[in-house]
Image: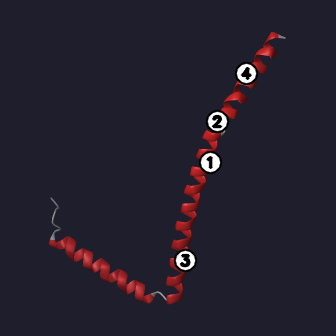
Amino acid sequence: NKQKATKLEIKNYFIHKKINANMLHKISKKKKKKMEENIKNQKIKMIYKEKARRFHVHRKYESGNSVASAKSSSKTNSWSEEDQ
């Protein structure tokens, strides 16, 4: 069940929509293009960040064995130091 909007909400929606449209008309084409480019660049950056994050997560799990062996070898070193 969707709630119906009140008359005031509908009126406000269209007022804001009209204001936004008027503001966009005032912005030059050059500025619009620049804004679109910025949005695209941000999206591309986000995609690359996400891919990089996934890649690093995979690398951690792949090299998990070497990390575990390095930890165990450091423990053996600390034990040998205590014995001396």
Q: Which mark is residue 64?
A: 2
Dot 4 falls on a residue whose secondary structure is helix
Residue 65 against residue 10 in the figure, above or below: above
Q: Is residue 58 left or right of residue 17?
A: right
As measured in the structure, the alpha-carbon distance from the residue carrying label 2 to the one carrying label 4 is: 17 Å
Query: Neighbour class for label 1 at 10 Å: few (<14), some, many (≥20)?
Result: few
Which numbered mark, 2 or 4, is in the foreground of this view? 2
Q: Is residue 20 left or right of residue 58?
A: left
Disc 4 + disc 1, Cβ < 8 Å: no
Residue 63 on image: x %, y %: 66, 39
Three-letter amino acid code of the residue under disc 3:
Glu
Three-letter amino acid code of the residue under disc 4:
Lys
Q: Is residue 42 left or right of residue 68?
A: left
Work out whether mark 2 precedes mark 3 in sequence or the reverse, and give the earlier one.
3
Dot 2 falls on a residue whose secondary structure is helix
Residue carrying label 4: 75
Dot 3 falls on a residue whose secondary structure is helix
As measured in the structure, the alpha-carbon distance from the residue carrying label 3 to the one carrying label 1 is: 28 Å
Work out whether mark 3 precedes mark 4 in sequence or the reverse, and give the earlier one.
3
Residue carrying label 1: 56
Question: Residue at 80% of width from left, 10% of height from top?
Answer: 83
Residue carrying label 3: 37
Residue 58 against residue 2 in the figure, above or below: above
